[in-house]
Image (tube, rainbow, N blue to C red):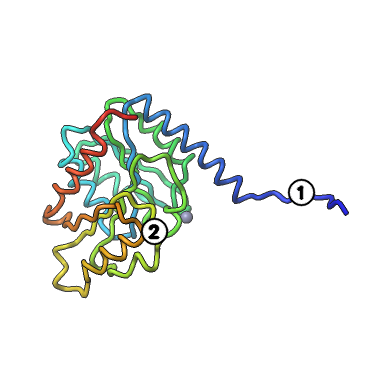
Amino acid sequence: MTMAFEIFETRERALADNAAAAELTRANLRAHGARLVNLMGSPGAGKTSLLLRLIEALKPLRVGVMEADVDSDVDARTVARTGAKVIQLHTAGLCHMDADMTRRGLERLGLDGLDVVFLENIGNLVCPAEFEVGADLRLVVLSVPEGDDKPLKYPLMFRVADCLAVNKLDALPAFDFDLDALRARAAALRPEAPVFPLSAKTGEGVDALAGWLKARLGGEAT
Ligand code: MG
Ligand code: ZN
């Protein structure tokens, strides 16, 4: 018997639309010779603090920033003080950035005069990992106080990470954080992703990450 209704795979369709929007962003980035980094991590991991360091350390690359938050403009204000081009995006409650929101954000920011744009995603280790936004690189920040077990609990985030920054290294003596265990757990999910222990507060370790990013982002856009 033929059924008289259609089964519409909404999730499949939404992901296909998302992939199409990400492709538009890639084309836009290529046209401008710019690169996009999707910066992800928990609230309080130190994404913004690390960005402040990277804006400086990545020079002469010209960095632009899209600060995505549910509300407020505190992060955009902080970044604006560095002189970097920045835009605050409000998701009005949504807990991640998708490709179309990112595409629109880049349009508003404008890519002229920029070599690298960082999208500071919503603080959350779950759904931002599910949505590709058209980025060239996914940089995940995990901080020492969050614990070394996070790759076990949020495997997708650590599977999509091209690079992992372990922030708040200065707080290591105060926490039972096993850096070797973290490395092993992250490597089990994404063996080729480098891990950079660092402190955005003191600056320790930031140059190593910046050097790696420069090598990955500084060349001709492909
Ligand atoms: Mg922030
Ligand atoms: Zn979400």
- Which numbered circle lies on residue 169? none
On screen, residue 88 versus residue 173, left or right, reads right
Q: Are marks 1 and 2 in contact (CB under 8 Å)?
A: no
| Quadrant of res 127 | bottom left
Badge 2 density bin: few <14, some 14–19, many ≥20, Cα 10 Å: some
Q: Is mark 2 within 8 Å of ligand 2?
A: yes
Residue drawn at (38%, 24%), measured in percent from left and top? 31
Tell me where residue 220 appears, x and y as whole percent: 28, 28
Q: State which tag comes first along the sequence, 1 or 2.
A: 1
Which amino acid type is shown beneath numbered disc 2? Asn
Per the image, label 2 sits on a secondary structure element best described as: loop
Tell me where residue 149 appears, x and y as whole percent: 32, 70
Tell me where residue 145 appears, x and y as whole percent: 25, 68
| Quadrant of res 83 | top left
Which amino acid type is shown beneath numbered disc 1? Glu
Q: Quadrant of the N terminus?
A: bottom right
Q: Which residue is mark 2?
A: 124
Residue drawn at (20%, 73%), measured in percent from left and top? 175
Residue drawn at (52%, 36%), measured in percent from left and top? 20
* Residue that protrudes farthest toward the bottom in the picture: 176
Which dot, 1 or 2, sits closer to the camera?
A: 1
Q: Which residue is mark 1?
A: 6
Measure how far apart labels 1 and 2 are at the Cα level: 35 Å
* Residue that protrudes farthest toward the right in the picture: 1
Per the image, label 1 sits on a secondary structure element best described as: loop
Image position of 221 with respect to 88: above or below: above
| Quadrant of res 150 | bottom left
Q: Quadrant of the C terminus?
A: top left
On screen, residue 199 versus residue 90, left or right, reads left
Residue drawn at (38%, 52%), measured in percent from left and top? 160
On screen, residue 88 versus residue 210, left or right, reads right
Badge 1 density bin: few <14, some 14–19, many ≥20, Cα 10 Å: few
